[in-house]
Image (cartoon, rainbow, N blue to C red):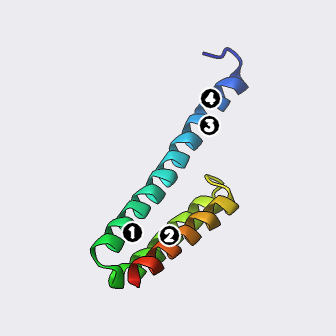
Amino acid sequence: MPNIKSAKKRVKVSATKNLRNRMVKSGMRTSVKKLNVAINADPANAAAQLSATTSAIDKAAAKGVIHKNAANRKKARLAKQLAKAAV
């Protein structure tokens, strides 16, 4: 445990940000899992879930939890997966 006041604050702030980042990333992963289930169950109605998943991924990228290129890659792969299942 740090002795310096500013270091104590950094530990608290870091813990808070870590919790927020984990929540955002977890929500994004949950959304991706829901999309995968929707694609396997009913590809025709999975488009609405794709929209929600895309939004979750964009929010994670906007908050700096994941890199913007990683977000775009994930979205492209999911859209490609949906298009393949719809055929």
Across and down, in percent, residue 34 comes to 35, 65
What label does residue 78 carry, if any? 2
**Cα separation between marks 3 and 2:** 34 Å
> 50 or 18, which lies in front?
50
Q: Of circles 4 and 2, which is in front?
A: 2
Left or right of residue 47: residue 75: right
Amino acid type assigned to the residue bearing label 3 in the image: Val
Across and down, in percent, residue 42 comes to 29, 78
**Cα separation between marks 3 and 1:** 33 Å
Amino acid type assigned to the residue bearing label 2 in the image: Leu
Across and down, in percent, residue 18 comes to 56, 40
Amino acid type assigned to the residue bearing label 1 in the image: Leu
First along the sequence among labels 1 and 4 = 4
Q: Residue at x 51, y 54 (%)?
A: 24
Amino acid type assigned to the residue bearing label 4 in the image: Val
Q: Number of labelled discs?
A: 4
Q: Which residue is mark 1?
A: 35
User: Under tag 1, what secondary structure?
Assistant: helix
